[in-house]
Image (spheres, rainbow, N blue to C red):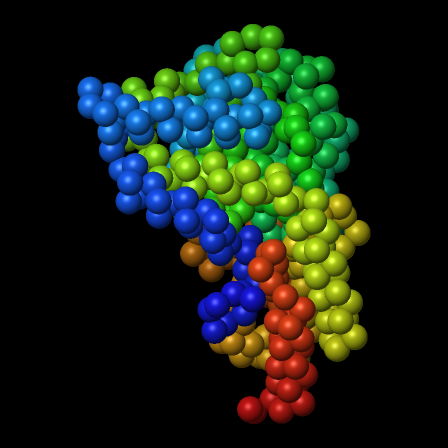
């Protein structure tokens, strides 16, 4: 159970750092703080060697080559680097990008920027009531001017998993690049090999430190070039900036634990999530969004009847869960994901997201249900 006094059910926003990762992070902050680029002295050379080791380890875990890996500050930078980098490199030849209405705001805002200021032709695919895309509609949207398809692996609000392998086959058939935002997938669905030309991740989504992530650019049978967004010391070919060795060591350890633990952890969290949904249905007549879709193991997006809204808002003072994505733009607009699935503004307003982690326990669920029942029976308490 999380040491926080408030049981934490908001793990799609961020996760508690693993104790083993924290030990690595603290060790490197204390002993290996030299700049890895300062190779003119012993401490710098040691840190440079450690950096190379950890970068190779991350690449091996992701089943890619080391020169296909870029270390970034997290998923938002990775997404911007991938989409803008590809577009700025190739838009004079092709400028059409296909994505989906339920993508993360980091993707949608980046595409909006390219559309408004650099003439990008953007197609956003619809989803059905379960949050699923239509692969035939995807293929019909591709034409001779299509440069890139941007579709996430797992949705951060509903947990819906897109069929990555089938999408990749379509993009390969039409010789179009495929960028997959895999940020929410690690530690929440079993991953062996990611079939995408570009993909990304962020350590704090899988029990690692904040401020560190990665972007993978597969060379495939041709060299894929990016237009770099950050210019400076050229520490990485496509990304300048001081190498944050302690954070990279933390990312390396967190990713190692994901693959070591994924079979057991995913099964455990899925049982916990399914039990949560079944017990909740016995107390309140709720609707589980995307329940019929393939989802990552930890996510429940739940719509409550109107008369229970005040109860849920009171419970949010004792338990950590969310009403929308933590990365919403603050506009006050209803969730773009649920809206794209056909929900009305009122239905979105009655929807709450619960996302669980390997640290959640059955006792926390029981405490939540006890408080829920108490709040229903004693509305003024």
Asked if residue 370 is positioned above or below residue 290 in the image, the reply reads below
Asked if residue 104 is positioned above or below residue 338 in the image, the reply reads above
Instruction: Quadrant for residue 118, please give it.
Output: top left
Q: Does the image show residue 35? A: yes
What residue is rendered at 55% in x and 38% in y? 256
Q: Does the image show residue 37? A: no
Q: Position of residue 277 (x, y in %)?
A: 73, 65
Of all residues shown, which one is farthest toward the left?
Answer: 40
Nearest the camera: 321 or 128?
A: 321
Q: Position of residue 18 (x, y in %)?
A: 49, 52
Nearest the camera: 319 or 358?
A: 358
What residue is rendered at 54% in x and 60% in y? 10
Nearest the camera: 207 or 137?
A: 207
What residue is rendered at 36% in x and 24% in y? 49
Q: Quadrant of the N terminus?
A: bottom right
Q: Position of residue 353 (x, y in %)?
A: 60, 61
Q: Quadrant of the C terminus?
A: bottom right
Locate residue 17 relative to residue 311 in the image: left or right.
left
What residue is rendered at 49% in x and 40% in y? 253
Nearest the camera: 353 or 121?
A: 353
Locate residue 8 relative to residue 131 in the image: left or right.
left
Q: How many marks?
A: 0
């Amino acid at each position: 159970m999380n040491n926080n006094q408030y049981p934490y059910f908001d793990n799609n926003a961020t996760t508690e750092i693993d104790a083993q990762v924290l030990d690595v992070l603290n060790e490197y902050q204390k002993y290996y703080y030299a700049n890895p680029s300062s190779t003119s002295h012993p401490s710098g050379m040691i840190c440079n060697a450690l950096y190379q080791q950890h970068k190779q380890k991350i690449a091996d875990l992701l089943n890619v080559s080391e020169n296909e890996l870029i270390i970034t500050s997290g998923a938002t930078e990775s997404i911007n680097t991938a989409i803008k980098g590809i577009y700025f490199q190739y838009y004079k030849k092709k400028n059409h990008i296909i994505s989906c209405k339920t993508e993360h705001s980091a993707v949608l805002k980046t595409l909006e920027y390219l559309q408004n200021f650099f003439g990008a032709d953007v197609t956003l695919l619809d989803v059905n009531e379960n949050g699923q895309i239509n692969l035939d509609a995807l293929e019909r949207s591709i034409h001779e001017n299509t440069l890139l398809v941007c579709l996430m692996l797992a949705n951060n609000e509903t947990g819906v998993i897109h069929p990555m392998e089938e999408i990749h086959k379509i993009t390969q058939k039409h010789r179009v690049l495929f960028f997959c935002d895999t940020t929410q997938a690690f530690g929440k669905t079993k991953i062996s090999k990611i079939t995408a030309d570009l993909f990304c991740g962020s350590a704090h989504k899988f029990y690692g430190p904040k401020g560190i992530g990665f972007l993978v650019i597969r060379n495939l049978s041709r060299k894929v070039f990016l237009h770099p967004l950050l210019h400076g010391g050229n520490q990485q070919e496509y990304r300048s900036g001081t190498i944050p060795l302690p954070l990279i060591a933390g990312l390396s350890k967190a990713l190692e634990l994901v693959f070591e633990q994924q079979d057991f952890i995913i099964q455990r969290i899925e049982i916990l999530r399914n039990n949560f949904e079944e017990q909740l249905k016995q107390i309140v007549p709720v609707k589980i969004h995307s329940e019929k879709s393939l989802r990552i193991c930890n996510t429940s997006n739940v719509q409550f009847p109107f008369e229970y809204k005040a109860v849920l808002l009171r419970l949010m003072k004792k338990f950590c869960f969310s009403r929308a994505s933590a990365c919403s733009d603050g506009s006050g607009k209803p969730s773009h994901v649920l809206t794209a699935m056909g929900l009305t503004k009122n239905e979105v307003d009655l929807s709450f997201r619960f996302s669980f982690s390997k640290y959640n326990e059955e006792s926390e669920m029981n405490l939540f249900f006890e408080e829920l029942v108490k709040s229903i029976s004693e509305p003024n308490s």
